[in-house]
Image: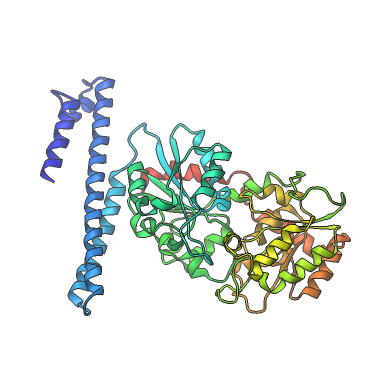
Amino acid sequence: MHSFTHSTDRALSGAMPGMSLAAGVDGGAASVAELAAAVAAIDSHQQLQSDLLLNIAGAIQQLGEGLAAVKQGGQKNTQLDAVMARLERLEGTLQWSARTASRTGAGAPIRVLFLIHHATAWPAVRDIVDQMRLAEDFEPVIMSLPHQFPVLNRMSGEAEVHEMLQAQGYAHVRLRDDDAANALECVKQLAPAVIFRQAPWDADLPATLSSKHLGFARLCYVPYGYMTARIEKQQFDQQYHRQCWRLFCPDEAHRELYAAHNALGDVNCRVTGYPKFDHLSRQVGQPGTWPITGGQPDAFRLIWAPHFSSDNDPLKFGVFYRIAADMLTLAASDPSLQVALRPHPALREAMACARPDSSLGRFLATWQSLPNTCFHEEAEYAELFAASHAMLTDGLSFFSEYQLFDKPLVFFERDDHAGFNAAGERLMDGMYRVRDVAGWLERLAQCRAGVEDAAIVAGRRRIAAELQPFPGAAARQIVEVIRREIGAA
């Protein structure tokens, strides 16, 4: 600490030889250049202080991890428990201090880091990046990461994110699959003032990017999807939610869910609208792009979007394994029906790793051999929605997203699913609900004949309007909140 203080004093005296900062401001004797040099020296001082605090926090973290390893090998020790708890509190305090000390300097752009591990959720923050790229007071930085989704449970997938960002023209820092252990070091080297992470689930990302390690920056969160399931504590009260400087809510319904279920209530919430809805809505009314070519020109275009959750998952929304054979029979028997299979990313990864001789492998081989079916795995799907005629799904994000397109949405519902939160319940008015294959086939026939329930049509149109309280302006509002409030927090 002694050497740090003296090095800072030298930096200040070197910036303004022969005069104090007070004399320059109060007496008017300093030139603009001298004042600028003084401000730069103060910024340097703050950065040195921030770096020091982060180094201390890292040392404490390593000590705590060492003590934890010792504890695992021996008997319960109450004194050791107390020391570890104190270290954890001290680390949190130092992270907070570092966050305060590393305020953006006068005139310097606000560096905002976007940690992208989930390619299909990229549209939830893409418009924010675009807004910041056009602003002189922001410096957005993107980092592509590996992930670990349910079902497959392995850290992988950075290449997919990289290829998507590269194809769309977004420069980014790569953290490849085999370098996940160094993720936190890379993030700290970038010295962001603000960090956006795509999901609240620590298990989805490299362990070093868990919530407890990111407190040195202002954390922000835009949900990767519109949260609808009745698992409110998981969706609104994770450690990441509690640590966030700002939680950006799609609408009042989500703010109320934070208020009811988050330990801090809605104190950090800002209702801004949802950039992902704005992104999708730009394709509403457009012809879109359908991935199946050839076949009958007047074929009915159906999206089948199964969720990953099965009997072993507490959500229990998924019906893929129950209806896969029936869907295969349906498609094979009717060339006037075209079906694009668009599975949840976790289910898609499981499908990609299925053995050819397994039941899933055989299903996929047959499915992809048919002329009127396809397996859609592109990160972007707005144009797919626009080109389709209807959707069959068992959950969950598409319950909201597809209603923006004002087309028939059919929910194949299990009796034992987890249920819906308050935001999810209000979406039910805009969709058809079936519980067995016979009911689904009947509804499909009605959709193909253009027969709709007037109440359902009115419901989805009302819901689409309610889902966008600030149409087209969500990203702009998020950027403005950061710009306006960062200096006061």
What colouring method underlies this structural image?
Answer: rainbow
Residue drawn where x is 55% and y is 36% of the image = 169
120 to the left or right of 83: right
325 to the left or right of 474: right
- Find the residue positioned furthest to the front: 357
From what the image shows, is residue 28 above or below residue 239? above
Find residue 264 and report its horizontal and vertical position in percent: 41, 63
Find residue 207 and report its horizontal and vertical position in percent: 38, 59
355 to the left or right of 218: right
Residue drawn where x is 20% and y is 77% of the image = 78
From what the image shows, is residue 64 above or below residue 481? below
Q: Is residue 426 visible?
A: no
Foreground residue among 68 and 241:
68
Find residue 111 and report its horizontal and vertical position in percent: 40, 40
Q: Please tell me in which quadrant of the rendered image residue 11 appears.
A: top left
Find residue 337 and report its horizontal and vertical position in percent: 83, 59
Give the tally of numbered discs. Answer: 0
Q: Please tell me in which quadrant of the rendered image residue 268 appears.
A: bottom left
Foreground residue among 35 and 378:
378
From what the image shows, is residue 463 above or below residue 37? below
Foreground residue among 2 and 302:
302
Q: Please tell me in which quadrant of the rendered image residue 460 appears.
A: bottom right
Residue drawn where x is 76% and y is 53% of the image = 388
